[in-house]
Amino acid sequence: MPEQWYKGYVTKIVDETYNTRRFWIRIPDMDLFDFKPGQFVTLDLPIHENKHKRWRSYSIASHPNGSNEIELVIVLLEGGAGTTYLFNEIKEGSELLLRGPLGVFTLPAELDKDLYLICTGTGIAPFRSMAYYIHQHNIPHKNIYLIYGSRYIKDLLYPGEMEQLQAALPGFYYIPTLSREESAGWTGRKGYVHTIYEEMLAAEKPPANFFLCGWKNMIEEAKQRILAMGYDRKAIHQELYG
């Protein structure tokens, strides 16, 4: 089948942190943008003559809500042609060319095992979609652990939302950890994500699925550590950024 590209229109832009923005995009040619939590869209940006160097993919941060509008959360990468264009040129009302939904980084058919959602940075996007979907549809589930690594408090995405979701969704645990924060105001976990899930699984190894989203180094290290704990490769699902 030929690639199907759609025109999307940016309806809203909000600065989430000092270097990340939330973009809401409406696809008017569709009554419903039907996707599974965890999937992504690809944008075709006018930044290069070669189409493969114009394409940038971003996980959908919103959950399926019956509309034709989606949310993306994007970090400005130093020297990154795609994000520089999005931050400097795209305004509310701007047009974007996109295709999707794409990808197989989606929830199992049955949530009959504990879920470890392990991410860094904007890797929280697909997990926000998954968690809201589970909550809104009252999907039966075991424990869900969102283990989210950032450098500083100022880098955290959706912290208030995740705390509210933890209070509203039984069995959902939001565990942010900061690798460089020295402020006395931070009383949460410090260090990297790996220490947390290893500590949680040190005593016993319950059946679990591991979803990893973020940069390559974090994902590769997590895979090695999870396998070293005795879990099967089939229990590990990944979405690589960059």
Image: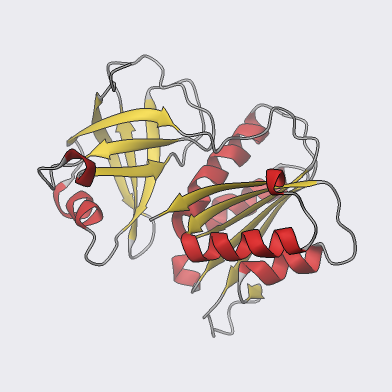
Horizontal side of 145 relative to 129 (left or right) equals: right
Q: Farthest residue in the right direction?
A: 203
**Quarter of the image that includes the N terminus:** top left
Q: Nearer the viewer, residue 159 or 200?
A: 200
At 69% from the left edge and 65% from the top edge, which residue is drawn? 225
Above or below, 73 relative to 204 = above
Q: Farthest residue in the left direction?
A: 49
Q: Position of residue 71 (x, y in %)?
A: 39, 38
At 63% from the left edge and 59% from the top edge, which residue is drawn? 223
Above or below, 30 relative to 209 = above
- The total number of labels drawn is 0
**Quarter of the image that includes the C terminus:** bottom left
At 63% from the left edge and 35% from the top edge, which residue is drawn? 107
Horizontal side of 86 relative to 65 (left or right) equals: left
Quarter location, residue 194: bottom right
Q: Is residue 38 visible?
A: yes
Q: Position of residue 173 (x, y in %)?
A: 72, 53
Q: Position of residue 45 (x, y in %)?
A: 19, 42
At 70% from the left edge and 71% from the top edge, which residue is drawn? 195
Task: Tell me how the rendering is colored.
Answer: secondary structure
Q: Position of residue 60 (x, y in %)?
A: 44, 39
Above or below, 68 relative to 95 = above
Horizontal side of 86 relative to 164 (left or right) equals: left
Above or below, 201 relative to 209 = below
Horizontal side of 217 relative to 30 (left or right) equals: right
Q: Nearer the viewer, residue 236 or 204?
A: 236
